Image (cartoon, rainbow, N blue to C red):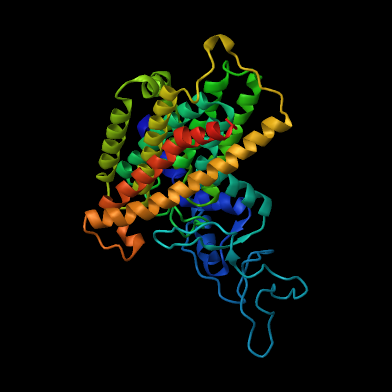
Amino acid sequence: MSLRQSLALLAGRLQEPQKVARFQRLCGVEAPLSRSAVASADLREDEEEEAPLSRDCRRREPQPEACGGPRTPGSDRNQCPAKPGGGGALNGVRNGLASEPGPASPRRAGALRRNSLTNEEGELAHVSNWPLYYLFCFGTELGNELFYILFFPFWIWNLDALVGRRLVVIWVLVMYLGQCTKDIIRWPRPASPPVIKLEVFYNSEYSMPSTHAMSGTAIPISMVLLTYGRWQYPLIYGLILIPCWCSLVCLSRIYMGMHSILDIIAGFLYTIVILAIFYPFVDLIDNFNQTHKYAPLIIIGLHLALGIFSFTLDTWSTSRGDTAEILGSGAGIACGSHVTYNMGLMLDPPLDTLPLVRPPITVTLFGKAILRIFIGMAFVLVIRDIMKKITIPLACKIFNKPCDDIRKARQHMEVELPYRYITYGMVGFSITFLIPYIFFFIGIS
């Protein structure tokens, strides 16, 4: 067998949904009773395919288990309804072991958000390991909008504006390439069953590569690259942060049933290649954004052109809106940094003061940081809500699209692109200019 054939075989195995389902079962996520027989048969079939030929195992088609028939010892999932007349065990109780209650009735695993555009919701599932469930919920949120809208402003307002801006540049580049690659490759999400979809917010997008894995790789690596040497701290802290952050985000996507192992590995390797090629130019891009006379026009035009190009790659999905949101945020933050630099509101420390030392944490320092977060995020949410209410009806009116159903209206490129681009462009602009100006005005900058 050639190397190419071996790699193709390995890739096929890493893409199998049975492996995702097996990882979910290992972490305590079980299918509801109505699906358990199907999922169990799929997993047994996958195990038989991987068994050594020397065992001379004969493949057989999975047969549905009849009530009262042979069942795996100790299996909680092989249950039957109670027989009429009271001759059998109650439903939900192991047959013949009435004193030991079986698993609780299926319920939705937690309050994961539904897909607001398609109205899909996560599947019913038994979760037996709740600490792991909440850990992976946190991990998957590290790649969602809520995290980004808190993380980047926190860096810009409270820690180091230069690092925050350059993290945004890297994030926009990595996420844009990842989203466009998804729409070019067009591989579907892992099949369900056997996989249990605990989250469906991104279920209408394609799967390869995992953009959660890409952002979960790019952000911690870039944080260490941008801060080590600029700030005084032991390198071991960064070397611990990178694998912990990356593995948490990557494993959470398999746990949620949203990606195959191959999607995760591809996303990780793709990000390493992107960083190796483009990271040396991040300093040049950031300096251009701040200092070039025509930087705002070039930034807005380039990001808008990239958004239009990405919208032509495939039919509608939530991926298109996310791409416009990413590009709009990046353009707004870059334009805001240009205005802020030219007004002298947030100047970077001179090079002769490097490496920077963490200031002592005092009540005043902590109080100002908290005030900046609460006041800044309040303005961000107000601006986002106002722009959303303005841009969607305005785009519908300009392009003559019906606005009765907002979900359907947003599936038109003429509505989705300007809504996301303008709304999050204003959010980004406020993060790097309007809100820092307010901080300066009230004396908490």
Tell me: 360 left or right of 197.
Answer: right
Q: Nearer the viewer, residue 307 or 124?
A: 307
Judge left or right: residue 284 versus residue 133: left
Residue at 56% x, 66% y is 32
Which quarter of the figure has residue 158? top right
Return the x and y of residue 274 as percentages of the image width and height: 40, 27
Is residue 43 left or right of 309 when viewed as pictured? right
Which is more toward the observer, 219 or 42?
A: 219
Residue 353 image point, x, y percent: 58, 11
Q: Quadrant of the C terminus?
A: top right
For residue 28, what is the image quadrant? bottom right
The answer to whether residue 2 is visible is no
In terms of depth relative to the viewer, which is nearer, 271 or 141?
Answer: 141
Residue at the (33%, 65%) spot, across then down: 405
- Residue 144 at x, y percent in the picture: 49, 45
Q: Residue at x 22, y 54 (%)?
A: 399
| Quarter holding residue 175 | top left
Residue 82 appears in the picture as rendered: yes
Which residue is depicted at the point 49% across and 48% down?
381
